[in-house]
Amino acid sequence: MSGAATTRTERVPVEGAALHVEIDVDGLDRGSGPGDGQGQGNHSRPTTLFTVNGAFCTVRVWDNVVGLLQPGLRVVRHDVRGTGRSSPGPADDYRFERYADDLIALADHLSVDTMLVWGMAWGARVALVTAARHPERVARLVLSDFAIDPADPDAQRAGARGAAAAREAAGITEAPKPEGWNHHDDPDEATKAMAATRLHPDLMPFVSQVRGPTLIATGDHDPNLISSRRALPAFANGRLVVVPHAGHGLVRQRPDTIAAIVKPFLLRSSSGVEHG
């Protein structure tokens, strides 16, 4: 059952830019002010989840998922600098390391010391780099539609068509597309922001730097599954779930299924090995 959430919108300054941020809080949230260590009251484990959007996506892409993660999680969404409603930054700051540091700056702004991080598709690359650069801050990491290699958009589109046909054959109702999931205040700037991928054609060096439990979830029709499987053995504490009847973009295609996979992983205690 999904929880009732209230959403707070903020404009958060980071180095060279300002981020559009939306904070979804369920009825069980017991505090989100400065000085509480995790930005979530007296919880004994992290319960603040930071999401990272996919390529050319905005915070709206998570609209069908957020309610399914509650009660239990405070969800912090943001538009990466230069995309959605966030301001652009200097051209040389459109790189994964800067996006990772922006995410940490956002956590600092909210007084969250220990984070849960979920990146989808392109955003999974940002999430990976965040956990690699700041392993002491990321308690649990979710990488959906994950690849460490360059994307193949044509193969992704073909996979999406195959997955849609598979869902139709299985009698699975299509999820509605969230309104505004790919609307940007400055589309040209959003295109520039996506260029970070070219700077890191192979993200494998970051994988070995991730310490915490990591869940990879990739659709069975997503061409990124090949890359997900290649990366898995290099994670110190990783697990791969292959989601049936799904192509690239699990939060859009199968929001109920991916939420049911991710939520128990995020709310588990930090101990235990996740290999599988």
Image (cartoon, helix red, strand yellow):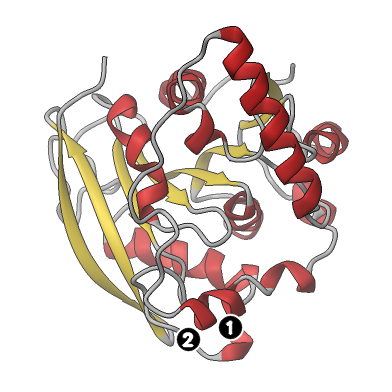
Query: Gap in Å between the C-alphas at discs 2 and 1?
Result: 7 Å
Q: Which residue is mark 1?
A: 93
Q: Secondary structure at mark 1?
A: helix
Taking the spot 71% from the left edge, 24% from the top edge, the residue there is 240
Q: Is residue 243 visible?
A: no
Location of the C terminus by quadrant is top right
Q: Relative to the observer, which residue lies in front, 54 or 116?
A: 54
Q: Which residue is mark 2?
A: 89
Question: Where residue 126 sits in the image (x, y, percent)?
Answer: 60, 58
Location of the N terminus by quadrant is top left
Q: Secondary structure at mark 2?
A: loop
Question: Where residue 224 sits in the image (x, y, percent)?
Answer: 77, 40
Q: Give, as a three-letter code, the residue at label 1.
A: Asp
| Disc ID at residue 180 | none
Q: Give, as a three-letter code, the residue at label 2.
A: Gly
Whether residues under marks 2 and 1 lie with C-beta atoms below 8 angstroms apart, the answer is yes
Tell me: 273 left or right of 66.
right
Taking the spot 73% from the left edge, 20% from the top edge, the residue there is 275
Q: Which residue lies most toward the top here?
A: 170
Tell me: 140 left or right of 236.
left
Taking the spot 67% from the left edge, 18% from the top edge, the residue there is 166
Q: Is residue 242 visible?
A: yes
**In the figure, 100 relative to 77: above or below?**
below
Q: Relative to the observer, which residue lies in front, 122 or 165?
A: 165
Question: Where residue 10 sits in the image (x, y, percent)?
Answer: 21, 65
**In the figure, 120 relative to 263: above or below?**
below
Question: Where residue 98 sits in the image (x, y, percent)?
Answer: 57, 74
Q: Relative to the observer, which residue lies in front, 171 or 178?
A: 171
- Label 2, residues with CA under 10 Å away: few <14, some 14-19, many ≥20: some
Q: Relative to the observer, which residue lies in front, 145 or 275?
A: 145
